[in-house]
Image (cartoon, rainbow, N blue to C red):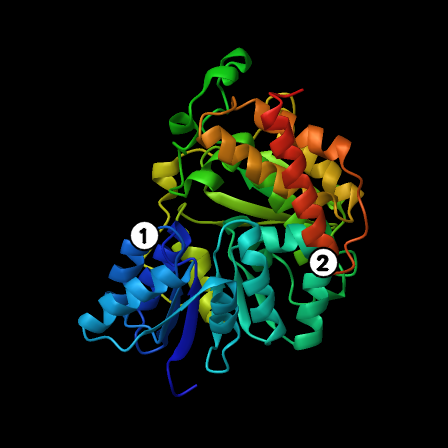
């Protein structure tokens, strides 16, 4: 390709967006920012636009679009500001775009990510909820459009790097026995169980190894993040839930492993920095500098592993049950978790009640087939309503 690749960054103001823009800026001859999107950090989005001069920016609503448009014009930029979900889908599917970083957190990222897939783009998937909610629909769209889907989660990117090139024929045909997802265990890995009732949002967001947004940090603390990744891995790699195991690895140096039938276990290692999987996916099948320091194994010194305790991490158990149930159950799991985590961050519920809310929703909402986007979004809406009723009734 003689011209720089045009990149849309969905969720540019989050931690993944920041890491993506850092990698892009290191290779101006290869990449050019086509569009940036933001939701709540609009002052940061303005700064990013001034720095990267994208062709488009997308904000939540018309008023925010008008304000940002005026500010950018006053600064001499020709960036066109769009708004809403329609604007997100436009910049995800634009003919000029070569690759889309899908980094909008939660269910809000589903439609624009799917728009990028349907347009046949190279999609760098950091929004795991898109696959959790609508895995079958999403993967069918990938096959139908010829889109290239590359995982950005450090765990799934590690698995992708450790699988053989022919894994699309199926794991068994490729000699794969198991996929091993690693997890740090988060900030509460050794916290006494009785103390979990009283942990604060600040404590939950203080991840020991990674710098992430508040929602995903809480998911990591509860290990729901790993549960969602388990579901995502099943869709990405055509695996059964029983073929995906989770192990706690506190150092976060081994990002995941693949176990083969001949006894070989391949692992991908690296410093805990999201620029590594981002650079890998951006340049694949080539390799480019990510700005990440080389891994110093002498400094790491040791690698520890332990089995997750489902009493400590009930969200992991609920996610595995949802993966096994299939249909709309994963979408309901994700929706209930989003409501519960938001309530915890607002100090309306205790940390341990996150799992209680999710369990309540899964036990009180009927599952169905996820054979259309309307079915998926309907299940998502019902689960959110049920979770909010739990909050209104104080858990009754």
Give coordinates of residue 134: x percent, y percent: 69, 56
**Residue 375 placement, left or right of 161:** right
Helix, strand or loop status at disc 2 = helix
Is disc 2 in contact with disc 1, using a CB cutoff of under 8 Å?
no
Res 40 seen here: yes
In the rendered image, residue 56, in percent from the top left (x then y), is placed at 37, 73
Q: Is residue 249 above or below residue 138?
A: above
Which residue is disc 2 drawn over?
A: 374
Q: Residue at x 76, y 65 (%)?
A: 169
Is 40 placed left or right of 194 in the picture?
Answer: left
Picture residue at 75% right of the left edge, 50% below the top: 261
The structure residue drawn at horizontal position 42% and vertical position 23%, both measured from the top left corner, is: 200
Mark 2 or mark 1: which comes first in sequence? 1
Q: CA distance from mark 2 to mark 1?
A: 45 Å
Q: As displayed, is residue 258 above or below residue 338?
A: below
- Which marked residue is nearer to the observer: mark 2 or mark 1? 2
Q: In the rendered image, which quarter contains the C terminus?
A: top right
Q: Which mark is residue 38?
A: none
Callout 2 environment at 10 Å: few (<14), some (14 to 19), or many (20+)? few
The single residue placed furthest to the bottom in the displayed view is: 2
Residue furthest out toward the left: 75
Residue at (50%, 44%) from the top-left corner? 254
Specify whether 329 is left or right of 206: right
Q: Which mark is residue 293?
A: 1
């Amino acid at each position: 390709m003689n011209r720089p690749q045009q990149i849309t960054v969905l969720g540019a103001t989050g931690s993944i967006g920041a890491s993506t823009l850092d990698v892009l800026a290191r290779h101006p001859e290869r990449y050019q920012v086509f569009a940036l999107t933001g939701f709540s950090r609009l002052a940061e989005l303005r700064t990013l636009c001034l720095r990267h001069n994208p062709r488009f920016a997308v904000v939540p609503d018309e008023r925010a679009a008008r304000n940002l448009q005026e500010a950018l014009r006053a600064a001499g930029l020709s960036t066109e500001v769009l708004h809403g979900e329609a604007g997100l889908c436009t910049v995800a599917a634009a003919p000029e775009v070569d690759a889309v970083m899908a980094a909008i957190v939660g269910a809000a990222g589903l439609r624009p990510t799917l728009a990028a897939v349907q347009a046949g783009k190279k999609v760098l998937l950091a929004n795991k909820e898109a696959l959790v909610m609508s895995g079958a629909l999403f993967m069918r769209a990938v096959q139908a459009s010829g889109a290239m889907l590359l995982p950005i989660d450090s765990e799934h990117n590690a698995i992708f790097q450790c699988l053989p090139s022919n894994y699309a024929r199926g794991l068994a045909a490729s000699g794969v026995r198991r996929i091993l997802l690693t997890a740090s265990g988060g900030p509460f890995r050794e916290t006494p169980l009785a103390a979990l009732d009283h942990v604060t949002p600040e404590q939950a967001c203080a991840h020991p190894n990674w710098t992430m947004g508040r929602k995903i940090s809480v998911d990591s603390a509860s290990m729901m993040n790993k549960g969602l990744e388990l579901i995502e891995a099943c869709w990405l790699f055509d695996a059964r839930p029983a073929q995906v195991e989770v192990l706690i690895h506190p150092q976060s140096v081994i990002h995941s492993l693949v176990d083969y039938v001949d006894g070989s276990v391949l692992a991908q290692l690296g410093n805990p920095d999201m620029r590594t999987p981002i650079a890998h996916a951006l340049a694949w099948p080539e390799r480019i500098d990510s700005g990440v320091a080389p891994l110093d194994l002498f400094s790491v010194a040791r690698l520890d592993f332990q089995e997750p305790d489902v009493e400590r991490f009930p969200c992991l158990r609920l996610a595995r049950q949802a993966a096994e149930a299939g249909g709309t159950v994963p979408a309901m799991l994700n929706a209930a978790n989003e409501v519960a985590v938001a309530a915890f961050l607002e100090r309306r519920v205790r940390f341990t009640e996150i799992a209680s809310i999710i369990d309540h929703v899964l036990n009180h909402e009927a599952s169905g087939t996820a054979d259309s986007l309307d079915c998926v979004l309907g299940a998502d809406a019902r689960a959110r309503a049920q979770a909010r009723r739990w909050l209104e009734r104080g858990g009754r």
